Amino acid sequence: MKKKEDTMNNKILIFDTTLRDGEQSPGSSMNMQEKLKVAQQLKRLNVDIIEAGFPIASVGDFEAVKEVASMVKGITIAGLARTNREDVERAYEALKPADKPRIHVFVATSDIHLKAKLKKTREEVLQMTAESVARAKGFVDDVEFSAEDATRSDKDYLVEVFQTAIDAGATTINIPDTVGYTTPDEFAELIRYVRTNIKAPDSVIISVHCHNDLGLGVANSLAALKEGARQIECTINGIGERAGNAALEEIVMALKTRKNFFQCYSDVVTEQIYPSSRLLSQITGISVQPNKAVVGGNAFAHEAGIHQDGVLKEKLTYEIMTPQSIGLPSNMLVLGKHSGRHAFRERVKSLGYELTDEQIDNAFVVFKQIADKKKEVYDEDIEAIVADRVLHWEEKYKLESVNIASGTDMLPSATVKITMDANVVTESGSGDGPVDAVYKTITSITKTKSRLMRYQVNAITGGTDAQGEVSVRIEEDSHTVSGTGSDTDIIVASAKAYINALNKLEQKKVNKIKGF
């Protein structure tokens, strides 16, 4: 068989198995509506093949594959099947509505699987392969065959199985590293051995499916490309069995970033990578680790002063791809104790303040003091530094007192006294609970139009007399601010937090009016 780049262009087909192999990751099960939502996002991402599920596995899986096949058009939809009549026929029934159906037949080929799991001889597996692929070919033109545990299989027997599948009508042969056992050089050699020893038309595609048990899933997949593989099976965020699968986002961005090296490309719309990652995390509840390549929270974040200075002068100093290329609006300079004056100045400027060099120097000293105490300094901290230590803005609202009446047999009520623009205002109000009563009364006094987005309580000391800390986040127009307050009385702490946030909101408004 000739090397694929000799007879066709160097496009790499992206076979996404998030809905099948990815869903097998513990805690990643999705209902039909969630599967359909992911499938629609995969179409926006422009992958070439969506493996929608394993139709024989359950009624739910069958219906989900059928729904994806019905609703997601213009893209190849694949369904998995073992090498038996029932699986193949069930897959075909689920895939009938698809514009481009693919039946994906698989069987194990390593001796350890044949003996311990299948309890079949090599000859029996060859016969199963021939019959099942031929049956699938009778239903659809596009048939893929996978040799499970290929990297631990006898190479000559592997070639024999693949040849059997090709002769029966397989249009794609997949070489999986099912247990993540191989290494890049070893895998490349296996791909080369299979490619040079099978007899097949140039239209037959060599595919790879690598797991990440040794952290080599992406590396092994990319090594296979150099030996003629032209389809990669992968998942969003690398989810999947055990340590997961090769990550789609890493493969696609490697091809894009190192195009001159790989001499290959994909048709994936890379600007949809980050939205796809976020959608999957939201649906499965499985967060991406911060240092995850491409889509991790820290992938485009810089804290070290030297790095921040370099990125501000020229992004290419420390970024090999742009955040915009994966669908992120910008990188992030994380301000902490390692940050330098340049990054601090730029953050202050981005918040709308134009300060003199002397003002920046004074604010930077305070910033460093805070940074030594906190892991990360937030925008609200910087705004407080500028307001309190540099521009000396006075707080518009000052909480004088708060009293509540609440119990099982009465409507909770609150009386709040606030000094506002040198005037003392006292009002009373009621609510569903004591905090709600306090907040409604404060809202009435201040006439704020802000919306409470988050309310959180934490105990910062132990015991029944613990001091509690309340944090809130409020939003008005395009402004979003956080506020905190602490007290042994959680109601008082809540009032302090709300007033703190309202003062920050006023500072933002004044800042905008003055043109800072």
Image: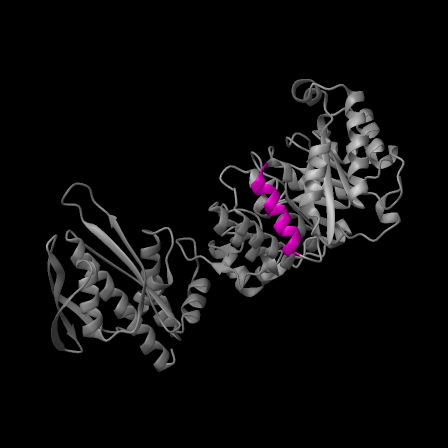
Query: Is residue 390 among the parts visible in the rendering?
Result: no
| In the depicted structure, whether residue 68 falls above or below residue 425 | above
Dividing the image into 4 quarters, which one contains the N terminus? top right
**Magenta segment includes 451:** no
Horizontal and vertical percent position of residue 125: 77, 25
| In the depicted structure, whether residue 361 falls above or below residue 485 | below
Its colouring scheme is one colour
Residue at 55% in and 65% down: 313
Q: Does residue 369 appear left or right of residue 426 in this picture? A: right
Q: Which of 36 and 313 is in front in this view?
A: 36
Quarter of image, res 508 = bottom left
| In the depicted structure, whether residue 189 falls above or below residue 12 | above
Quarter of image, res 269 = bottom right
Q: Which of 53 and 247 is in front in this view?
A: 53
Dividing the image into 4 quarters, which one contains the C terminus? bottom left
Q: Does residue 100 appear left or right of residue 441 in this picture? A: right
Q: Main secondary structure of the magenta part?
A: helix
Q: Does residue 51 appear left or right of residue 343 in this picture? A: right
Q: Nearer the viewer, residue 362 or 270?
A: 270
Horizontal and vertical percent position of residue 396: 22, 74
Q: Which residue lies furthest to the bottom in this view?
A: 514
**Magenta segment includes 59:** yes
Q: Nearer the viewer, residue 513 or 384?
A: 513
**Region of the chain picked out in magenta, as a range:** 58-72
Horizontal and vertical percent position of residue 164: 84, 31
| In the depicted structure, whether residue 88 falls above or below residue 503 | above
Count up the numbered dots: 0
Query: Is residue 10 among the parts visible in the rendering?
Result: yes
Horizontal and vertical percent position of residue 316: 61, 60
